Each structure stands twice: as C-alpha cells, then as structure tokens.
Image (spheres, rainbow, N blue to C red):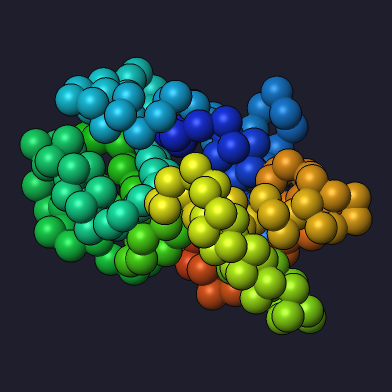
C-alpha cells in the first residue's frame, strides 16, 4: 500500500493531474497507484501521532506528506521532522530542495514535499503560478497589479494567501473563465515546463518506486 497525505481538497484533486500531465500514469480512479488521504488542514496532519499512526498501518510500503510551506518551508519541515525522528533517526535537520525521502530497516519509506519547492514560502497555488504559460508576460504582471490594488482597496484576503488570489484572478481571465485548479491542469491552461515540476516528479517517483 502506498499512501499520500495532503492538506485539503485542492491538493487531492490537483496532484494526480499534475503528475499525469508530467507523464506519470496515475491508474484507474478506483485503483490509483497511490492512495491520497485528505487531512482537512495542516493542523490535523501535523498533530502529534497523526503521521506516525499512518506510518504504522499494516501493509504500508511508502507514505508521503505534501504540505504548504506558508511562511517558512524550514519551519514546516522542523515540525514534520519532530513527528518522525523516533522512527527515522537520520532525518536531516534542514529540508533539501529535492524533498525528503527516508528509509529505515523494517519501516515503510517516508517522504515529505513542502510546497512550492521545499525552500521558499508559499503553497500549492505558488507552485501552479510557476506553470502558467509565459507567452503573455504583461498579463502575468497585470494579475499581480490587480491583486495589490484589490488589497489597497480593502480586499480582506490574508497576505499569506496572495498567491491563491493571483492564480484564481488569472484563471478568471482565461477561456473558459474561472476554471478550478484541477480542471485548469487537465485542460493544459497550467502546464508550462518548469524545474519545480521536474523535481516534484523525481521526488514522487523515487518515493513510490515499485521496485
């Protein structure tokens, strides 16, 4: 059994399509190569014993966690590391840019990826911003201007959610407008090649290798 823990419904729907557009065969809907479990938020995922309980599940081969960095990827990794250090004593102090994969005798493989790229602040939406087509740079810049102007006019979204506001504003101007994230990936509105997707796919394949 191969399992992935994610924060919410956007991750649950978007990640399989991200991988498929990058050439990873996800399998049938009723028999995917990896079972994704939505955790209803980062607080649930990072609660004491939550990850370790999943790691001790019978028949588990590999467990991955994908979580947003929000304000700090390294702070997020330190919390994850604390949760698994008793099981994986060689867990690194700092989060590698390539993601974490840990192996220990008699235990399932454990991996962690912190959106967007294990280094910078951000979230799934930050990762997807990297994948927008670059053929209209003025529109990309305008999306940032619109978000800032909305904030100046009293828009109540939190500063840490600016990338969410930007990607959804940009999607609102596409044809058809206002696609959900997973639909935008499926329809190749989001799919520009970027080193972040290559690194993410490499991490995923190393973690869930069938070998």
Residue at 64 percent across and 43 percent down: it is: 14
Residue at 9 percent across and 36 percent down: it is: 86
Farthest residue in the front direction? 153
In the image, residue 45 above or below residue 102? above
41 with respect to 9 (left or right): left
Q: In this view of the protein, can residue 206 be seen by the observer?
A: no
17 with respect to 156 (left or right): right
Residue at 73 percent across and 80 percent down: it is: 138
Identify the image quadrant of residue 192. Answer: bottom right
In the image, residue 56 above or below residue 169? above
72 with respect to 94 (left or right): right
In front of the other: 7 or 205: 7
Residue 174 at what x, y percent from top left? 84, 58
In front of the other: 202 or 97: 97
Residue at 27 percent across and 57 percent down: it is: 72
Residue 191 at what x, y percent from top left? 72, 64
Residue 179 at what x, y percent from top left? 79, 45
In the image, residue 166 above or below residue 97? above
In front of the other: 10 or 154: 154
């Amino acid at each position: 059994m191969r399992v992935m823990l994610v924060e919410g419904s956007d991750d649950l729907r978007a990640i399989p399509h991200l991988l498929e557009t990058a050439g990873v065969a996800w399998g049938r809907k009723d028999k995917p190569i990896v079972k994704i479990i939505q955790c209803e938020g980062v607080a649930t995922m990072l609660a004491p014993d939550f990850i370790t309980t999943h790691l001790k599940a019978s028949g588990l081969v590999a467990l991955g966690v994908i979580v947003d960095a929000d304000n700090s990827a390294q702070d997020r990794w330190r919390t994850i590391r604390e949760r698994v250090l008793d099981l994986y004593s060689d867990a690194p102090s700092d989060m590698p840019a390539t993601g974490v994969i840990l192996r220990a005798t008699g235990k399932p493989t454990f991996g962690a990826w912190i959106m967007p790229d294990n280094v910078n602040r951000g979230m799934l939406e930050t990762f997807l911003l990297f994948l927008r087509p670059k053929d209209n740079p003025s529109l990309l810049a305008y999306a940032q201007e619109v978000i800032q102007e909305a904030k100046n006019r009293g828009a109540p979204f939190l500063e840490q959610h600016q990338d969410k506001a930007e990607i959804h504003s940009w999607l609102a101007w596409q044809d058809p407008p206002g696609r959900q994230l997973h639909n935008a990936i499926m329809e190749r509105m989001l799919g520009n090649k970027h080193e972040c997707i290559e690194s993410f796919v490499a991490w995923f394949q190393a973690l869930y290798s069938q070998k």
